[in-house]
Image (cartoon, helix red, strand yellow):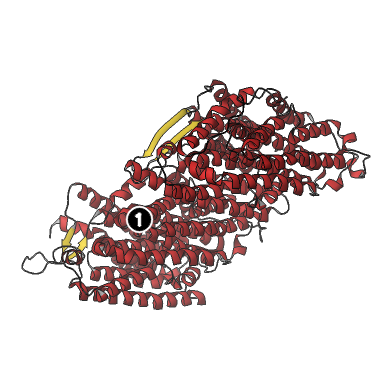
């Protein structure tokens, strides 16, 4: 039941906000913020009471809508989805708190945000494939509105591009799900069944696996995004309002990585083994490509957007290295990237609120007028680069260790991503923050206020906490990813290479 | 004749009586539109109630087939069929008619002396639509088809002072008559091939085809093909769709929703009756044909919709695409009927809602509804814009709307029947369709309003639009009761 409430609470919140009368519009902002607290509390409660070491789905809800069609309200959470849920629940209150600059159609904005939260939480806990797809696809609508109604100048183009790209991906996903549901239905003697756990027990021929892997994979690859399907990302991130960018980078991209783990690698082990090297190569290309393109961006929001492509490349490399360390690392990078990039977009948004420009050249010497802001930015830049002791290090280190076991060349190339990250982030830092204040308009900038500090500090603490002591996170991730690898070993001739003891225990 | 024998044709009798009363009122009163309206709505509600009685009678095990003669010595041809399929079609048609007439009310008020004729024609047309679904015989089906079509030709051209309305009506009439001619030719060839016009009973088409091996099926197949073409015209499936955009654009916005949605329901019901009831043994022949028509409709409909700059034309072309999606369900034969019904019910309501919004935005008498009229609608009438957004999302098949459930239904039906290529084609056109609907949404929400005058929305229209928007979400969240009823509504 707790997962049902997790999904329903933000949706109920959206309804409550929608019913606020025009005369009481001052209630909209505080109430919306309050509506994101119960899901956060639930998510934290789930994380605490989660049975460590149990690789199977916990807190399951199973209610069948239609016996013959095999559709149901089936929810469950394991070590992989747990952290995606926590990430979502943490980022939404911060994103909404950072939305005070939205003054036009505030009510619709908040309703869209809360529906988006419900849908994203639904994506990560759904165990019915049709339900998963429904949540996965409905995300389009609030995100389209967020970009299209509250975005910057080029919003109309960016919002349409976002819709078409992701919808193009999802058609393959829906097609794959329907075909798979018919196959599962044949196996159990029903018309169709969309139950994920039944699909896991259904044996599929290797050709079927290959086709379905491709169908599911394209949808998730667009979301991750895997190069060359990444072109929507920079436009959408740049044109979206601050909160939209935070959720896009922080949570939406994780739907892709999560989907690849949950569906592709779990359901189609043979195809996974066959295609792993190719996808790991694409991941590595993404690491280098995203980083190189980020270096030359004149727009700081675009820079952070391209850095996301690089970091998500690490996720793909880690997943398709097919080692325990790689998979754990991939999931950890998703969590860490969500926190760090979310924080970076929040910081960029705070600067944009003051100066209404995102061009790096318009700044310079900001550190002398906004010292706290500069400190926060540098901290998050270091976290993004992967400074030991901060969260970025743990995940990327595990990915590189894990991929070195199976694809050593790619691991070496991928490691260059860390160096490139240092270049683009520190160079950008240098141009924005150091030196004298070159532009007179920047002389009068106020440093961060109390509200803005309160938004960033939780992320600073979390980034440090899981960077220094990642064990609680990894302990929950590992049984679930090992279960995926065991399934791959059981159904194919692939053997996961062993590398000493289990990873974890600190990033130092 | 006892009461039980009247029950199967009770809706038609009620509607025809209603039409007569409306015309009589015209002779008695000077301008009897208010009284005529009461009579028209009463007749439509009574027809709906009669359908409920029919459903209950079927629960009690009433006969489904009704014959031309009670005398056993003559060949007994089933004429009317009262199965759950026909009754369910009745539910849909009468609900659509009630809702559609409510939307058309502002148009009716503006018609001056011709109000009563309008109401009488709506009642006659609706009676024809139901007869198409409830016929057990190609001749009866043709009579229903013509009754409905002739009424609707006139309704499409009712605002005579506009040249494009005239053009729309003439075009509708010419191409519609052609379709009727093709249909009746097909029926005659089918008669030549099977020696029967009836679908059911001893000596009926179904029995003939299951008991005999047709060695030279050319005439039979040609007749079947012509029937499919004729009905494809009516439901505006490509490549027989050319009339639809011009007619939808030219006909008065207040009534075009009723015409479009009503004809689609009855046309598909008739198609299902002919193919699934009468010609089930030829499914290997007609299923591929329908798959091709469905595929062509989806592609032409969505691609053309993407380049239109008039919302009514967009709705017309997207309607062609939706006809394709609905037709997808037929390739699964009897298994696809539930999916077909669900799609048809939800789409008909959605279409009506969308045209209702168009009638507010561009005026209920006008034909054109260019996108510039819609620009910045969210600032002129926010509630209307958000309702239209929900309606558009439903058409696009976004999850948690009824359109999603409907699309999943037809996709699984086609996939289960082995038509994976058709499903993937449909998925592609769905994405292009999203572009179509989001484009309208972008104009409404991101365009600048040309005049800031707030729109006045007639109460009845506002209620209809609100109900359609709410039902779009509710049926998306809880489609199961409707799916269950649709699953029972199989043809005999």
* Residue B185 in the image, given as x and y percentages of width and height: 28, 77
In which quadrant of the rendered view does residue A38 lie?
top right
Q: Nearer the viewer, residue A361 or B95?
A: A361
Please state if B42 lies on the left or on the right of B349 as rendered: left
* Residue B221 in the image, given as x and y percentages of width and height: 28, 72
The residue carrying mark 1 is B417
Provide the chain ID for the residue under circle 1: B
Q: Look at 67% across and 55% down and name the residue there.
A: A156
In which quadrant of the rendered view does residue B135 lie?
bottom left
Q: Secondary structure at mark 1?
A: loop
Q: Nearer the viewer, residue A89 or A310?
A: A310
* Residue B377 in the image, given as x and y percentages of width and height: 61, 56
Reply above or below: B354 against A495: below
Reply above or below: B182 against B266: below
Q: Look at 41% across and 61% down and name the residue there.
A: B261
Say which quadrant the C terminus of chain B sits in. Answer: bottom left
Please state if B394 lies on the left or on the right of A44 as rendered: left
Q: Is residue A106 visible?
A: no
Query: Disc count in the image?
Result: 1
């Amino acid at each position: 039941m707790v997962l049902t409430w997790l999904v329903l609470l933000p949706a109920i919140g959206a309804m409550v906000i929608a019913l606020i009368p025009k005369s009481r519009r001052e209630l909209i902002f505080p109430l919306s913020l309050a509506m994101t607290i119960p899901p956060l509390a639930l998510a934290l409660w789930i994380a605490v009471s989660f049975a460590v070491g149990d690789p199977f789905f916990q807190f399951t809800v199973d209610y069948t809508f239609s016996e013959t069609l095999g559709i149901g309200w089936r929810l469950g959470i394991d070590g992989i989805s747990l952290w995606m849920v926590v990430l979502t629940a943490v980022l939404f209150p911060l994103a909404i708190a950072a939305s005070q600059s939205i003054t036009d159609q505030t009510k619709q904005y908040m309703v869209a945000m809360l529906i988006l939260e419900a849908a994203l939480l639904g994506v990560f806990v759904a165990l019915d494939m049709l339900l998963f797809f429904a949540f996965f696809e409905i995300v389009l609508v609030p995100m389209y509105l967020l970009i299209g109604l509250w975005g910057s100048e080029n919003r109309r183009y960016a919002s349409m591009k976002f819709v078409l790209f992701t919808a193009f991906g999802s058609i393959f996903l829906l097609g794959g799900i329907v075909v798979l549901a018919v196959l599962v239905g044949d196996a159990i003697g029903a018309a169709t069944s969309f139950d994920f756990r039944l699909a896991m027990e259904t044996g599929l021929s290797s050709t079927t696996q290959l086709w379905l892997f491709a169908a599911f994979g394209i949808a998730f690859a667009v979301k991750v995004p895997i190069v060359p399907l990444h072109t929507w990302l920079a436009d959408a991130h740049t044109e979206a309002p601050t909160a939209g960018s935070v959720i896009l980078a922080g949570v939406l991209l994780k739907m892709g990585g999560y989907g690849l783990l949950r569906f592709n690698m779990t359901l189609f082990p043979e195809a996974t083994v066959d295609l792993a090297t190719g996808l790991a190569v694409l991941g590595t290309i993404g690491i280098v490509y995203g980083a190189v393109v980020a270096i030359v961006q004149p727009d700081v929001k675009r820079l952070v957007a391209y850095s996301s492509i690089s970091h998500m490349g690490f996720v793909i490399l880690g997943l398709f290295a097919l080692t325990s360390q790689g998979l754990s690392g991939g999931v950890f990078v998703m969590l860490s990237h969500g926190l760090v990039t979310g924080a970076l977009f929040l910081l960029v948004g705070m600067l944009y609120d003051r100066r209404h420009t995102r061009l790096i050249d318009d700044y310079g010497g900001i550190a002398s007028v906004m010292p706290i802001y500069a400190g926060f930015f540098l901290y998050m830049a270091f976290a993004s680069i992967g400074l030991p002791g901060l969260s970025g290090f743990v995940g990327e280190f595990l990915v590189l260790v894990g991929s070195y076991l199976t694809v050593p060349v790619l691991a070496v190339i991928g490691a260059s991503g860390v160096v490139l990250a240092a270049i683009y982030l520190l160079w950008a830092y240098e141009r924005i923050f150091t030196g004298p204040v070159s532009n007179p308009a920047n002389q009068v900038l106020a440093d961060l206020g109390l509200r803005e500090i309160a938004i960033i500090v939780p992320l600073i603490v979390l980034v440090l906490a899981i960077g220094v002591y990642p064990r609680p996170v990894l302990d929950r991730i590992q049984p679930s990813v090992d279960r995926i690898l065991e399934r791959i070993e059981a159904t194919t001739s692939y053997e996961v290479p062993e590398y000493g003891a289990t990873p974890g225990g600190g990033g130092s | 004749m006892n009461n039980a024998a009247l029950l199967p044709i009770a809706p038609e009798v009620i509607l025809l009586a209603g039409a007569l009363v409306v015309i009589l009122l015209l002779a008695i009163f000077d301008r009897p539109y208010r009284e005529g309206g009461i009579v028209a709505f009463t007749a439509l509600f009574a027809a709906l109630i009669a359908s409920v009685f029919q459903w209950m009678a079927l629960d009690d095990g009433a006969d489904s087939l009704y014959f031309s003669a009670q005398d056993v010595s003559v060949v007994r041809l089933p004429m009317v069929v009262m199965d759950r399929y026909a009754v369910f079609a009745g539910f849909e048609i009468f609900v659509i008619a009630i809702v559609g007439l409510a939307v058309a009310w502002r148009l009716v008020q503006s018609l001056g002396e011709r109000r009563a004729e309008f109401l009488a024609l709506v009642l006659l047309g609706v009676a024809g639509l139901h007869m198409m679904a409830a016929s057990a015989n190609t001749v009866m089906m043709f009579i229903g088809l013509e009754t409905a079509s002739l009424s609707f030709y006139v309704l499409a051209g009712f605002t005579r002072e506009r040249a494009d309305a005239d053009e729309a009506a003439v075009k509708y009439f010419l191409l519609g008559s052609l379709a009727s001619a093709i249909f009746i030719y097909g029926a005659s060839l089918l008669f030549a091939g099977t020696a029967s016009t009836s679908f059911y009973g001893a000596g009926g088409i179904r029995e003939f085809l299951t008991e005999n091996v047709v060695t030279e099926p050319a005439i039979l197949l040609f007749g079947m093909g012509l029937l499919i073409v004729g009905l494809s015209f009516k439901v505006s499936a490509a490549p027989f769709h050319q009339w639809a955009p011009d007619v939808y654009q030219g006909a008065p916005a207040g009534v075009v929703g009723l015409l479009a949605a009503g004809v689609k329901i009855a046309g598909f019901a008739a198609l299902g009756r002919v193919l699934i009831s009468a010609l089930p043994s030829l499914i290997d022949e007609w299923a591929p044909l329908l798959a091709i028509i469905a595929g062509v409709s989806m592609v032409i409909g969505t691609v053309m919709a993407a380049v239109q700059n008039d919302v009514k034309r967009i709705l017309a072309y997207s309607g062609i695409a939706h006809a394709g999606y609905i037709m997808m369900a037929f390739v699964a034969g009897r298994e696809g009927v539930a999916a077909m019904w669900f799609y048809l019910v939800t789409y008909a309501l959605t279409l009506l809602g969308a045209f209702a919004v168009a009638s507010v935005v561009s005026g209920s008498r006008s034909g054109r509804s260019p996108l510039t009229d819609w620009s910045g609608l969210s600032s002129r009438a926010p509630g209307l814009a958000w309702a239209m957004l929900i309606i558009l999302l439903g058409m696009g098949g976004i999850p948690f709307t009824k359109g999603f459930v409907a699309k999943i239904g037809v996709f699984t039906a086609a996939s289960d029947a082995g038509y994976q290529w058709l499903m993937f084609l449909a998925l592609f056109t769905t994405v292009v369709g999203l572009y179509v609907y989001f484009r309208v949404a972008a104009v409404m929400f991101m365009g600048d309003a040309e005049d800031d005058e707030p729109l006045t929305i007639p109460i009845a229209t506002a209620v209809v639009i609100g109900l359609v928007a709410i039902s779009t979400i509710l049926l998306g969240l809880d489609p199961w009761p409707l799916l269950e009823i649709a699953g029972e509504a199989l043809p005999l």
